Image: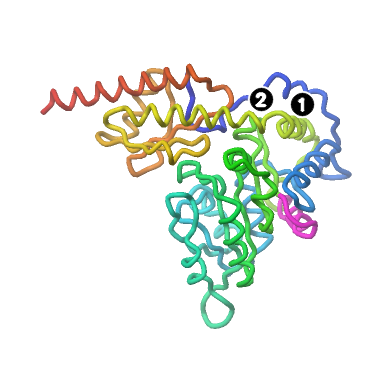
Amino acid sequence: MIDLRSDTVTHPTLEMRHAMVQAEVGDDGLEGDPTVIRLQERAASILGKEAGLFVPSGTMGNIVSLLAQAQPGDEIMVGDRSHIFLNEVGGASALGGIQTQQIPNEMNGTLDLNRIEQGIRRSGGARPVSRLLCLENTHNYCSGAALSVDYLGAASDLAHRNGLNVHVDGARIFNAAISLGVGVDQLVADADTVTFCLSKGLACPVGSIVCGSSDFIATAHRIRRMLGGGMRQVGILAAAGLYALDNMVDRLSEDHANAQRLAKGLASIPGLSIDPEMTQTNIVIAEVHDGDVPTLLDELAEMNVLGSYIGDNLLRMVTHHGIKENDIDQALDITSGVIARGQGKETDNS
């Protein structure tokens, strides 16, 4: 099976599993788990922040960050194609009473700075107050676009000048850093808070990290417990994260190269549209001209290729650890054949 549904399907390597078995553990909810503490300190250092917090998932990392920086009745500004808005079960409003203001995402994942400034709502009157600007890097539904240091700096400066904090949903922030050839700390230097996932391209079995100031992390730690995220001998998972930060970051360039190979191959298949230049990292999104994507996915699955549907006749495929060049070539051959057969059926029916 060539599984291109997401980089969440990665499996820990044998070496990572060995690190997990050998992990020193304690009670993370009480005196602390020494391996978790090392992971949190290491992650914060890499991102240039004061402190870090290990959480079970990226979604929890984001909701913890939002609840720590906005109160019920406040407003956060998010992209209309952001993960926080589309894929986190409305957690900001359901759990925090926080309103979202959706700003259209540009094709490159950014939010127009003028639209941000025009949308900021200040205290007074009957309107909710804008407290937090949320940016996503890389941007999942914008073909894995990597937001630049310059853009993030300009957006953060605008937010701060207007009294807003900045949160970066950096689920794949290391992909962005590798693609842009910059340090990950540079990408989040001006952000107040940031999350990143260990369980996507870094191939850990579970977990994400939240980073920010020491005061913020103290609040976030309390909220994590409120959400049921208190953990015990979780050093066996943190050990995987430490291994990943040492060994799984630089290899992300392989996933990007495979994504380019996939994007260029899909662009050559009649019935699909994709601009390979839009594929900067490991997420490939193509438009299907005829037929519906769920049916196409069912037919591909019968031939042992898995992808995902993200609406609007869009097919998404994600490269990751465990996917090799020959897998890409095989997936392209199968996709081409399935689409050609589908077009042939349509011709026969006509």
Question: Quick check: 233 above or below 155?
Answer: above
Q: Which residue is rendered at x = 53% and y = 22% of the image?
A: 323
The image quarter containing residue 42 is top right
Q: Which residue is mark 2?
A: 12
Q: Is 305 one of the magenta-colored residues? A: no
For residue 335, side relative to residue 325 (left or right): left
The residue carrying pointer 1 sits among few (fewer than 14), some (14 to 19) or many (20 or more) residues within 10 Å by Cα, namely: many
Q: Do labels 2 and 1 touch, CB within 8 Å?
A: yes
Q: How is the image coloured?
A: rainbow
Question: Quick check: 338 above or below 226?
Answer: above
Q: Which residue is rendered at x = 68% and y = 38% of the image?
A: 207
Q: Position of residue 306 (x, y in %)?
A: 44, 26
Q: Is 215 one of the magenta-colored residues? A: yes
Q: Which residue is mark 1?
A: 20
31 and 140: which one is in front?
Answer: 140
Instruction: Please state which amino acid type lies under the numbered disc 2.
Output: Pro
- The stretch in magenta equals 211-225
The chief SS type of the magenta part is helix
Q: Position of residue 198 (x, y in %)?
A: 66, 37
Find residue 331 and name its label: none
Instruction: Please state which amino acid type lies under the numbered disc 1.
Output: Met
